[in-house]
Amino acid sequence: MGISKSKYTLYRQCEKALWLRQYHSELAVIDPTMQARFIAGNQVGDLATGLFGDYIDVSTYKSDGKLDLSAMIAKTQNCLEKNVNVICEASFSYDENYCAVDILKKEKAGYAIYEVKSSTDADKEVYAQDVAYQKWLLTKCGVNIIGTYLVCINSDYVLGDSFNLQEFFLIEDISGNVEKEIVRVENDVKSINQLLKEESEPVKALNVCCHKPYDCAYWKYCSKSLPIPSVFDLYRMNFSKKIKLYSEGQTAFEAINTSKLTDKQQMQVACTLNSEAYINRNGIRQFLATLSYPLYFLDFETEQPVIPKYKGTHPYQQIPFQYSLHIKESKRAPLQHKEFLGDSINDPRRALAEQLCRDIPMDVCVLAYNKVFECTRLREMAEAFPDLSVHLLNIRDNIKDLLDPFQHGDYYLPSMGGSFSIKVVLPALFPDEPELDYHNLDGDVHNGTQAMNIYPEIASMSTDDQMRARRSLLEYCKLDTLAMVKLWEKLIKESTKIN
């Protein structure tokens, strides 16, 4: 087959990305966030098949696990001849171009295309590109398309005693957007077919399309010639502005006109060019003065089920399933550690909240890194469990943010590269301590997205794999709070030095 709808939409974002996918797919970097999006898309797509009652899914696989497109096209034709009302993955080919329609629904005067997305935000202009290609191809195949619709997730849906499929989805008519797009499809198809015949890689400079509408899997490859650091490493600058500076030749830090940068960006550039740290010890002392023993270092891990699993929750709600807690009762007291990890079957929130209230007394100083995350989860649990709300909200109200001295610019090293993520700050401050390196953790969990992805899978694993996965999750989350302890100790050490 020549073009598919995924190839068409990738072309609309970036023709070079499509060429790379065709000839050098091994260069793609699929990070855990992208993988999570693919998983969510498959889950939602499977769920939507029942939206209009009985249906026939023509999906067919070869012995190697790949889709059997020829068989799917034949099955679709058979369904059309039998006047099947709803066909899922309805497959068509025209002039070696192919598409599979998520849901093709028979109407009185023709057929309607329903494109299913796992998003709660109906970006009609972007999604219309995909649907316009489908309508164009089906029309070429002699199918009368009288309506085009977008099926997305209702962000206001809350799971009750049972799941309501009709309330979970929202259906929006995007026919107007599709008609605006369809006029260019035929020329695009010709251009794509010509592009894919080219043996030479297209020349294209970095552009806003590298991250819009989706992050490109070939960013690492296309940006490999950038100096390190570059304008793309600047702290808190939107990508389109970085692209503008890049297009003006302000790529290396030496070439950037710093007069138009923020104070923190200027500090970042200056520290890098001078190979020196910036440490504001008075600022660090002021932060440390807000803390008091006993200290509780807290970190949550969460899952975000696209399809709500627990009563009272909504799509993509952050569900805390794990926490790690390091405790320092006094200056000379030994470091203690407590933890919680759900079973991946039952709603973990109640058990987690109860144990957290036992582990953290009221009116004590709690530290988190980027506290807005932990504070929001505590508020949500307080709303879900009113009998625990006083204690949970007390914990929330006593949280201090260990991110502050770094984000406020009181402690900056060039090796932080403009990022204040704990995954970056920790190795910058402790470059020679491998036990603090997340990459050195045993198992498959080295970041929060991996933790989020693996937790729901535990229940379906073998006993040995369950034990391995749980051990990986516990060690990962434990390192998060140990990292906070180490950063706090580093701040104390710096604060004792004379300016």
Image (tube, rainbow, N blue to C red):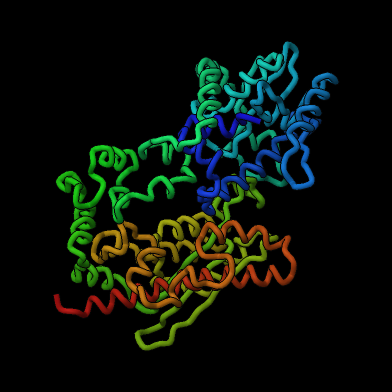
Please identify the residue farthest to the top as the structure is shown: 109
Query: How far from the left and from the top, in percent, is residue 155?
Result: 56, 39
Q: Nearer the viewer, residue 455 or 189?
A: 189
Q: Is residue 166 left or right of residue 359?
A: right
Q: Residue furthest right?
A: 82
Q: Is residue 497 above or below residue 480?
A: below
Q: Position of residue 26 (x, y in %)?
A: 54, 49
The answer to which image quadrant residue 23 occupies is top right
Does 70 sit left or right of 30 as displayed?
A: right
Seen at 69% across and 24% down, the residue is 93
Q: In this picture, is 379 found above or below 60?
A: below
Q: How many marks are shown on the rendered structure?
A: 0
Q: Quadrant of the C terminus?
A: bottom left
> Residue at position x 35%, y 85% from top?
331
In screen coordinates, is 154 left or right of 266? Answer: right
Closer to the camera, 487 or 378?
A: 487
Left-right relation of 242 to 278: right
- Residue at the spot x=60%, y=68% of the render? 341
Q: Is residue 386 visible?
A: no
User: How far across and down, in percent of the image, does residue 406 sit?
Assistant: 29, 63
- Looking at this rendering, what residue extends furthest in the front direction? 199
Residue 338 in view of the camera: yes
Residue 145: x and y, percent? 67, 16
Which quadrant of the figure contains the N terminus?
top right
In the displayed structure, 349 sits above or below 498; it is above
| Residue drawn at (79%, 32%) of the image | 71
Residue 44 found in image quarter: top right
**Nearer to us in this view, 307 or 139:** 139
